[in-house]
Image (cartoon, rainbow, N blue to C red):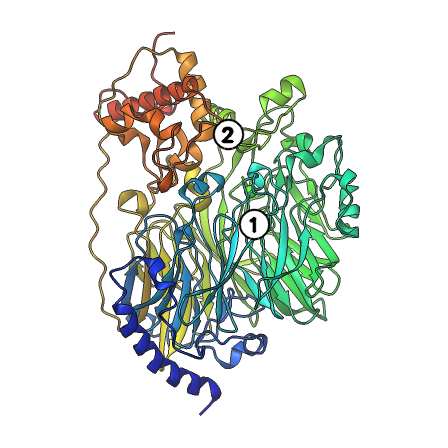
Amino acid sequence: MTKSMLVSVKLTALTVLFSLLMSSCSQSDDESINSDSISLGSTEIGLIDDERIMSAESEPGNWLAYGRTFEEQRFSPLKQINKDTVSELGLAWYKDMGTNRAQEATPIVVDGIMFLTSSWSKVFAIDAISGETIWSFDPEVPGEVARRACCDVVNRGVAVYNGKVYFGSLDGRLFALNAETGEKVWEVNTLYDTERFYTITGAPRVAKGKVFIGNGGAEFGVRGYVTAYDSETGEQIWRFYTVPGDPSLGFEDPAMEMAADTWKGSNWWEFGGGGTVWNSIVYDADFNNIYLGVGNGSPWTRDIRSPGGGDNLFLSSIVALDVDTGQYKWHYQTTPGDNWDYTAVQDMALADMEIDGVDRKVLLQAPKNGFFYVIDRSDGKLLRAHPFATVTWASHVDLETGRPVENPDLDYSEEAKWVLPGPLGAHNWQAMSVDEKSGMVYLPAQDNPLIYSIADEYKKTGIYKRNPGRMNLGLEFGRITQLFLDNIESQPTPKGYLKAFNPLTGEESWSIEIPHYWNGGVIATEGGVVFQGDALGMFTAYDKDSGEQLWQFNTYTSMLAPPITYEIDGVQYVSILTGTGGGDLFSGEPLDPVVKPASLNYNNSGRLLVFKLQGSEELPQPNLRIRDIPKQNITQVSNSDLKKGEIQYHDFCAGCHGLVARSGGVIPDLRLMGQGSHDGFDLIVLDGILSSNGMASFSDVLTKEDTQLIHNYVKARAEQDRLVAAGEIEAGKERLTWLDLED
Ligand code: CA
């Protein structure tokens, strides 16, 4: 009997015991589980250490770390479910997560127990065979924090290490829980500035007795950094800032002094700079490195952020640090002087590859900017950078200089320009899978443009003031939306793809077009199968080699989260979380020809689905969502006021409620508001009576006059869509703007 078999036998007995104990708590609130009364003596659960993750290949049934192994290739050696058997795949069980907000987590599966997070940073330990909840933990994130998050109240998962479960909460705390009981072991506030809008949505990583966590918030004007904490005590070991602060206060380290030389202007640090590390942090045992995937600039527009130019280190970069000290070793900047929200936070994978006859230890990343980077981990040198989607902002990356060659025709500092990719990226955080043996990467990609235009205020006055209560992008969404509507006929069509991509040659061995661009993460397996959940609610298995569709299951819910696979007692399982949202809430209901996502047609049901061969469970049949817009009580309002309301709505509301007041099906559609909401509009928007749901007060940034403008705009949009639905006015371009009321 191997050690892991022994552990698994012990755990099965313990799991039964927990289930019995926990069933008595099942009627009570989550937090009651965090009591001292539940103690089962020595910790046997979640016994993961560095050695165990390093030898993860010897226990392929478990999923021990975020990307399965330290290398984060997300390729599973399991093959019970394979090209021949996958047609027999069926639902084994499902668990309602009790929310209709987006699910983004990668579960960790160790010795029969699955640990995962859900929306509002809630954590669950689940029996991975039965789906029974063993414990859950709610960090009780205050509802109003939702307003500080660019992209909904999401969380991408936990780390499990030495009997503890680590996760970050949306409001910036890092927790260590006892893996056996869910009791809190320690909690730290990771935020050095609680006034600015920092959030945590990413999964922490663990290695060498440390927990690593970054944060998000670049759109709101924060300064990015990553902190390493002692995994046992929560004590801070090091912190690395990704962009420099005010030089007059001195630099934290030589790397910040070097970076400061690449920022220009008189007060660039006041904007915060951005560079948040909100997703990918990878440990490399070969070089004792930790790699940070660094985000976009704040504001987005470089003319405003750093007038006079400069690369603005370490925006949009991969930065290598010494894992023990946090000292800078090298960096590679994917987008010098970022101007488009081109984060390099997308998942990084480590691999060994033979390149031009030389064995190299490489880092692989497909960031937002559309080029797939292959970087030498020994020194950060660029080896390859092929485009994997439509890229118009640059013609290519010069391998000699390592720099992209920008397209001067698409400079948007004078006039608005459609650019590909837009801020949702050619690839976002949705996981890719690397098949090291074949050299192929399975990649969820998209062509999704934005019309970029520098803020009017700055164009007219040369001044751009940071407003602490809102996004400060340098190309504000209110105006961008109007440009979008005025120029929609020249918009390149948004499309989604699943691609089998060779990062060394830039060739695709196959590519599947998906009629909606915002799809889920990917896993590939030794069984020759690639799994992905998509916006249309289809969970699909493809032949890894040909792209042929082998199996499909309708979940009736759009998906973003990556599937994982694990094996217990000789049975292989595949799991996926359903529920969309995240960064795409702004787009709302898609415009033709992009098809409606399943979550708009049905409900955005947050569920954990687990499949096995011959599984026979069924999901409840959902009802089609009925969205009848009530007749609006519209007071006389001028077109110029409607245009003002349109700008205000898109600057402050559309980020969640959707473009042109049409929700994408996750956050309430304001066109469907009842009389109570209309009557209480200011109570909601200014007084914050719904803040516990995440709808916080906007009284710091909006006046009563503003809310009146917004309210009138929403009502006009609702009435227009109602009349189109009733066949009383024609659908067409004009339906995207406003009713033709008297000036
Ligand atoms: Ca961003």
Task: Tell me residue 543's x, y (percent).
Answer: 41, 66
Q: Is residue 535 left or right of residue 491?
A: left
Specify the amino acid type for callout 2. Answer: Phe
Task: Tell me residue 375's x, y (percent).
Answer: 68, 60
Specify the amino acid type for callout 1. Answer: Asn
Q: Quadrant of residue 84?
A: bottom left
18 lies above or below 588: below
271 lies above or below 508: above
Residue at image coords 48%, 62%: 158
Task: Tell me residue 605's x, y (percent).
Answer: 30, 51
Image quarter where the N terminus lies is bottom left
CA distance separating discs 1 and 2: 23 Å
Residue most toward the front? Answer: 36
Disc 1, SS = loop
Residue at image coords 72%, 70%: 357
Residue pointed to by mark 1? 215
Q: Is residue 147 visible?
A: yes
Residue at image coords 44%, 59%: 562
Residue pointed to by mark 2? 477
Point out the frontmost of discs 1 and 2. 1
Q: Is residue 504 visible?
A: no
Q: Is residue 246 left or right of residue 141?
A: right
Disc 2 residue crowd, few under 14, some 14–19, many 20+, Cα 10 Å: many
Residue at image coords 49%, 71%: 64
Task: Tell me residue 288's x, y (percent).
Answer: 69, 69
Disc 2, SS = helix
